[in-house]
């Protein structure tokens, strides 16, 4: 078939789809109230040209300033509602959670890219509740999480050793440690010191998932019939990307799960999410599949999000040395020089606790969260929110709103402490982990990992700007566009605070 014929055929398919869309518009039922305000769209395609590709949270912030806390766009019949205030998000996603807890159907991401069985994309229903029940049992309470404190402390100590040896590979060390912690908790798997296959699997799968063009990038999300076109057709490159992503997602779910099952069959499995799910019972085929994908959801969720947060912690320490000195002074006074801070010290180190909170606020890991879906038509604040709408909460703006957080660009842990009778600013954890029944089930684990990495790193390292030719080089604050946003690569100097610090790092990490 010639290229010209291919193009004509693809154009015909698109025209047919637009025709079907127009017919749907003609016969659609009359809406009971106006949509929320938003930028005016074009005929046929609606607001397709208004959707930003780079740092969309900034464009959505501008919409909020122009149209109010809730705004609306429509792309080929798909309604999208953007929320720019915590109050509106809580009113809709928390207080009306029965209506706003679904996930939108995204053919590219769900079906073709292989993510449909993860908790993140699962529709609200019985299977969703089973996943949440499993994860709550293993990591959903402080008592449950205490089971894994030693794992976190050992792996974070190993992180310090790697940074001491090769500080220029900081980001790789952060990723390795995050993967090591989540794999041991999820599957009881202890990673190899380098080139671990399971860490590699997760990185490839999540790099594909969180690519910079993931948001509204594929036309198939709005014209699902395009999924039927063959992969070889010009313009159908998304089919190849989807196939590769599907293979990686399946491998990410199956390979470590098989390891854990083999360990249990041999009677040598340590405690983990999987071993806890199977404890004292035999699972049906359906329950087995739920267990596999529950663990995969934890594995995927914990392999990348804390990487971004901890990398941002080092960026903040490079840029805000006064904060670093205050934190180190607290550690020195409370913990002393003879041991590393541990998770049992959290209540005794309020400044470090506030610092960890500020990491979550200052570096918003998922600037737009993940879209909620609307399960039935709803009227909210006089506006019509049709069934099937996407609800996007602009978490980045909520955590950088100057009316809520004074000087939001400044990294200031003291905003979360009571000083001179002044009340602390709002907790970021009520925003950054999402809302309603879709709130992140691993939030306690994420907070503990960030706190421990920060406390232990500050106890033994000084982090500062790199000096080149006698001149300090300040790193740039710039974050990637993507579902999970990472700081762009930056240079910093990481050196032991003293000879005693070096000795402390080099002690055996198994204790």
Image (cartoon, rainbow, N blue to C red):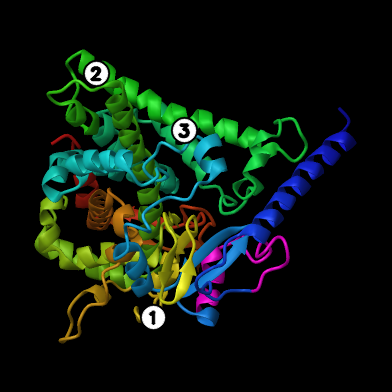
Which circle, 1 or 3, is nearer the viewer?
A: 3
Residue under the image location 33 percent in, 45 percent down: 164
Please state the extent of the stretch shown in magenta in the rendering: 40-64
- Nearer to me, 324 or 467: 324
CA separation, marks 2 and 1? 51 Å
Identify the residue position indicated by label 1 in the image: 407
| Screen quadrant of the N terminus | top right
Q: Earlier in the sequence, mark 1 or mark 3?
A: 3
Give the quarter of the figure containing the C terminus.
Answer: top left
Secondary structure at badge 1 equals loop
- Residue 442 spot, x, y in % from top left: 27, 48
- Earlier in the chain: of badge 2 and badge 1, it is 2
Is residue 62 a member of the stretch shown in magenta? yes
- Please name which of the two marks, 2 or 1, marks the residue nearer to the observer: 2
Q: Which residue is mark 2?
A: 263
Query: In the rendered image of this protein, does residue 450 appear above or below residue 427?
Result: above
Label ID, residue 249 = 3
Provide the secondary structure element on which disc 3 rests. helix
Q: Residue at x 46, y 52 (%)?
A: 484
* Mark sitting earlier along the chain (3/2): 3
Q: Is residue 395 above or below residue 511?
A: below
Residue 212 colored in magenta in the image? no
Crowd rating for badge 1 (residues with CA inside 10 Å; few <14, some 14–19, many 20+): few
Q: Is 253 rendered above or below residue 424?
A: above
Residue at horizontal 69%, vertical 37%?
A: 237
Residue 509 visible, this orientation: yes
Q: Secondary structure at mark 2?
A: helix
Q: Residues within 10 Å of mark 2 (few under 14, many from 20)?
A: some
Q: Measured from the top left, where is residue 213 in percent x and y? A: 60, 51
Q: Main secondary structure of the magenta part?
A: loop
Mark 3 and mark 2: Cα distance apart in space: 22 Å
Mark 3 or mark 2, whichever is nearer to me: 3
């Amino acid at each position: 078939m010639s290229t010209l014929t291919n193009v004509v055929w693809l154009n015909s398919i698109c025209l047919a789809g637009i025709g079907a869309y127009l017919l749907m518009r003609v016969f659609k039922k009359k809406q009971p109230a106006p949509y929320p305000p938003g930028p005016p769209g074009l005929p046929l395609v609606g607001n397709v040209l208004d959707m930003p590709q780079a740092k969309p949270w900034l464009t959505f912030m501008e919409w909020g300033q122009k149209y109010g806390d809730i705004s609306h766009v429509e792309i080929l019949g798909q309604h999208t509602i953007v929320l720019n205030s915590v109050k509106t998000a809580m009113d809709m996603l928390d207080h009306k959670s029965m209506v706003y807890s679904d996930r939108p159907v995204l053919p590219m991401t769900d079906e073709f890219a292989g993510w449909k069985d993860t908790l993140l994309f699962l529709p609200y229903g019985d299977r969703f509740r089973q996943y949440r029940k499993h994860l709550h049992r293993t990591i959903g309470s402080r008592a449950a999480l205490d089971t894994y404190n030693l794992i976190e402390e050992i792996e974070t100590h190993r992180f310090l050793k790697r940074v001491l040896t090769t500080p220029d590979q900081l980001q790789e060390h952060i990723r390795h440690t995050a993967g090591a912690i989540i794999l041991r908790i999820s599957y009881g798997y202890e990673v190899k010191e380098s080139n671990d296959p399971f860490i590699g699997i997760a990185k490839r799968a999540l790099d594909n998932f969180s690519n910079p063009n993931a948001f509204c990038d594929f036309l198939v999300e709005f014209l699902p019939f395009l999924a039927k076109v063959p992969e070889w057709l010009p313009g159908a490159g998304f089919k190849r990307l989807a196939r590769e992503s599907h293979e990686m997602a399946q491998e990410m779910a199956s390979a470590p799960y098989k390891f854990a099952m083999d360990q249990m069959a041999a009677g040598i499995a340590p405690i983990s999410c999987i071993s806890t799910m199977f404890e004292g019972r035999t699972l049906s085929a359906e329950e087995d599949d739920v267990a596999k994908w529950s663990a995969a959801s934890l594995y995927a969720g914990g392999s990348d999000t804390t990487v971004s947060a901890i990398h941002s912690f080092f960026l903040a320490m490079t840029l805000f040395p006064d904060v670093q000195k205050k934190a180190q002074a607290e550690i020195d006074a409370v913990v002393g020089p003879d041991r590393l801070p541990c998770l049992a010290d959290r209540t005794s180190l309020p400044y470090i606790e506030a610092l960890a909170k500020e990491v979550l606020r200052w570096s918003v890991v998922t600037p737009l969260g993940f879209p909620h879906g609307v399960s039935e038509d709803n009227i909210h604040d006089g506006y019509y929110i049709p069934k099937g709408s996407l609800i996007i909460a602009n978490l980045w703006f909520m955590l950088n709103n100057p009316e809520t957080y004074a000087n939001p660009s400044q990294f200031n842990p003291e905003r979360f402490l009571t000083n001179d009778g002044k009340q602390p600013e709002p907790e970021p954890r009520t925003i950054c982990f999402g809302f309603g029944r879709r709130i992140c089930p691993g939030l306690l684990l994420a907070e503990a990992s960030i706190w421990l990495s920060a406390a232990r790193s500050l106890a033994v390292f000084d982090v500062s700007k790199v000096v080149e030719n006698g001149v300090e080089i300040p790193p740039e604050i710039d974050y990637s566009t993507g579902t999970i946003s990472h700081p762009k690569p930056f240079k910093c100097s990481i050196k032991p605070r003293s000879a005693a610090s070096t000795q402390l790092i080099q002690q055996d990490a198994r204790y």
